[in-house]
Structure formats: C-alpha cells, structure tokens
Image: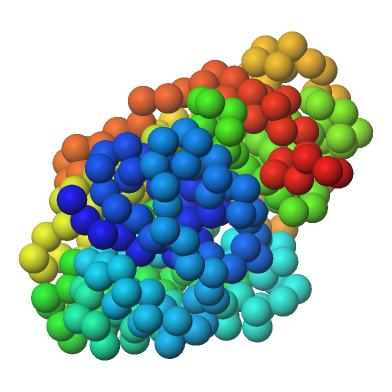
Amino acid sequence: MRKILVTGGAGYIGSHTCVELLEAGHEIIIYDNFSNSSPLAIKRIEEITGKAINFVSGDILDQKTLEQTIHLYNCDTVIHFAGLKSVGESTSDPISYYENNVAGTLSLLKAMKSLNVKNIVFSSSATVYGQPQFLPLTETHPLSTTNPYGNSKLVIENILRDVFASSPDWSITILRYFNPAGAHSSGLIGEDPLDTPNNLMPYVAQVAIGKLKELTVFGNDYDTPDGTGVRDYIHVTDLARGHLKAIEQIGESQCLEINLGTGVGYSVIDIVNAFKKASNKEVPFKFAPRRKGDVATCFANPNYAKQTLGWEATLGIDDMCKDHWKWQETNPNGYNPAE
C-alpha cells in the first residue's frame, strides 16, 4: 500500500479517485487550495469511505509547503490533478494557465526531487492530440494543440519525458483523459462548476433541473450520424479506477502515456436523449453555428490501457446520465446548499 499525495484531490476527478484509493487500502493526503473545489467534497469522501483524510491547504506553486507535506506524511507517490482546466478561459487568460499548470508542476517536481520521491501519475488530456489525423486515437498519434489549456498539458508532458530521460529511476504515468462525465453512484460527490458549465453533461443537467433555459448545440452539419459532434465520454468512476490501476503498476523505471477512454463515441443529441431518459425531464436545445476549433468526431483506442494497466471502462452512457442526475437532483446547487 502506498502513501499518496493527491494534488487537487478535492476536485471532480480527484475526489472520485480518492474514494477508489481509500477503498483499496492506500493512504492519501489531499493537497488543495479550493480554487475550483469545495472542502465539503473531502467530508463527502470520508462519508462514502468511512475513513478520515489527511488534508493540507496549499497552493501548487508553493514548493516549500509541498516539501513539508511530502516529508511530514512520508509520501512515496504523487497523483497530480491540480491545475486550471477551462479551454475557453485559457484563451482569454493564458498567463494564469501557464503559471498554475506549468510553473505549478515544476514546483511539485522540484519538491519531489529534493525528497527523492520519484513516482508520479499525471492528469493529462486528449487535447494533446489536437485535430485528429486518424481515429480511433492511439497513444502514437502525433501531438499538437489548439489552445493554451492543451498547450499547458503538452508542455508538462514534455517536461515529464525530459525528467525521465535525465533520470530513468523515475516512474511516470501520463494519463490522457477523454471526456469525463457522471458522478459517484452515491450522489454525494460530482462535478460542481463554479459558474456556467463548460462541459456538456453538467450543462444538460442544469437545463433538465431548470437552472438553465436551454442547451446551445454548436454545429448540426458535421459528418456524423445526426450532424452533431461525437465525443468519447467516460464515467468518472471508471476514470478514477484507471488511476488506481496506474498506482498498482508503478514500476522501477518507466514513462508511460496511456489513453483513458471507452472507444465509443456519442453525439450531443445522444447525450441529450440519454439524459432525458435518466431524468424523465425535458432538455430543450437550439442549434448554433460550429465553434472554431471543434472537431466532428473524437474517440479513443483504449487497447493500450487494457494491455498495460489491465483496465477498461465498464460503465456506459446510461450509467453516466443516471449517476449525474442523482448528483444534480440531490445537490441542485452543487456543494453550496445555501444558494
């Protein structure tokens, strides 16, 4: 069993991963500054697992506090989620994205190196593939990006590859997510956007519950079965289990890049229909012109994850919608019940 520092552990994917790690018997230390998360998420993780959690309030840019935390809790492994994650926001404020995501990761790596902790699992993204040149996307697809958020992830990947090349006693696992969706089956933790959701599933959920008037579907003239964009949606619990598998296969010397996706694409209209079925609510929508930079279709080839981690997605679109609706209905204002 490992002692794992989880940066950004109170966030959407981080919180679900902490549940899986605790239930598998690992010890975790959550390190978070709540810039895009809530302290209540930690209480809910404790409620789900029945285990107390060590928590440190800290910023990823603060190397000294990172070193103190790793030393105090004798951490041997890091899962690195902390970072800003909105594509749209990254184009209007790229400096914050490079500072938090890139400089923050450098602070973390310096802290790890100073204490000789050399096991890291990094939260990357399928955005590093840019415009797909072929489908399904394999890990050997050329890397390129179309926005500062994607750039920051690719820069960090390159830093990690350089770290490994300079010192092969590191164990580095880069996990490239496709489109996380859904929530924990308990309804206690889920995605809680601070303002208007950037991702499709929480937007649809807020339309279904009446917080938002209607969904805008960008583009209905793509070369897809119904004309709307097709994406690979992965249940956040499957994603969390992928991190658990990555922890279980940490090696003496490795630098792996692994897709976490289902290999199945669903259109925007597929998601709307599945959510209507799960919630028994209407989801009004309107079509609008395509957005610049959006691609028609994007989905993973998940075979390498099965081969290296023994992992594959087990939950489908109906599970994602059902679990997200339970979270939305139980927590209409997310982690802020006073709203």
The answer, for residue 152, to whether it is visible in the render is yes
Height in image: 64 above or below 220? below
Quadrant of the rendered image containing residue 325: top right
Q: Report x, y in % for residue 313.
A: 36, 31
Q: Residue at the location (41% across, 36% down)? A: 49
Quarter location, residue 250: bottom left
Q: Position of residue 18 (x, y in %)?
A: 41, 47
Q: Nearer the viewer, residue 16 or 54?
A: 54
Q: Nearer the viewer, residue 276 or 210?
A: 210
Left or right relative to 282: residue 8:
left
Name the residue nearer the viewer: 145 or 97: 97
Q: How is the image coloured?
A: rainbow
Position of residue 334 in the picture relative to residue 134 (left or right): right
Q: Is residue 18 above or below residue 35?
A: above
Residue reaching furthest left? 252
As drawn, is 98 to the left or to the right of 113?
A: right
Compare residues 274 and 84 and report the one nearer the observer: 84
Residue 284: image location, x then y, percent? 85, 25
**Residue at 65% of width from left, 65% of height from top?**
35
